[in-house]
Image (cartoon, rainbow, N blue to C red):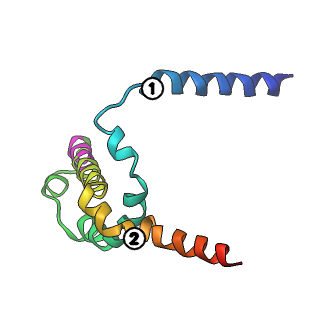
Amino acid sequence: LRSTYRVFLEAAKSLLFIFCVCPRSEGWMSHYGQYTIYPYIVHRLLIPVYYYTLYKVQWPIASDSNSFLAGTIQYFLLTLALLTIEIGLSTAPVRYVFSPIVEPVWAQRLYHAAIGRK
């Protein structure tokens, strides 16, 4: 009985969180949210750039002092940069270039043609 109550309590908290936090109208990020498959797949090409930026570049904020504020600013700027990159990977030119790979309409045509022959 106790575990059943706990499961219902956790489910109620999850539903309350979703109800309060998830937007019910379109925002500026909704358009890019429709194309999240592109950053998910294409970002693998940028992993060497991420690695170089994170580990090889000496960031002036973190190297001057080792304080909590400097680290917080550094992670905020990094998060902002990565968000900008991910939005950039969802734009129309990137979708145009990578759509034959990510959404292969030509493969669907081949599949339907092969099924139609049998």
Q: Position of residue 66 (x, y in %)?
A: 22, 50
Q: Residue furthest front?
A: 117
Look at label 2 and name its amino acid: Pro
Residue 43 badge: none
Apparent side of residue 108 relative to residue 39 in the rendered image (left or right): right
Look at label 1 and name its amino acid: Val
Apparent side of residue 20 relative to residue 29 in the rendered image (left or right): right
- Residue 75 in the magenta stretch? The answer is yes
Quadrant of res 56: bottom left
Residue 21 badge: 1
First in sequence: mark 1 or mark 2?
A: 1
Q: Position of residue 51 (x, y in %)?
A: 31, 69
- Above or below, 12 relative to 48: above
Name the quadrant of the C terminus. bottom right
- Above or below, 48 relative to 96: below
The residue under label 2 is: 100
Residue shown at the point (52%, 27%) measured from the top left: 18
How crowded is the residue under tag 2: few (<14 C-alpha within 10 Å), some, or many (20+)? few
Q: Give the structural element (helix, strand or loop) at label 2.
A: helix
Q: Give the structural element (helix, strand or loop) at label 1.
A: helix
Name the quadrant of the N terminus. top right
How crowded is the residue under tag 1: few (<14 C-alpha within 10 Å), some, or many (20+)? few
Q: Position of residue 41 (x, y in %)?
A: 42, 65
Magenta region: which residues?
69-76
Distance from Cα at disc 1 to Cα at disc 2:
35 Å
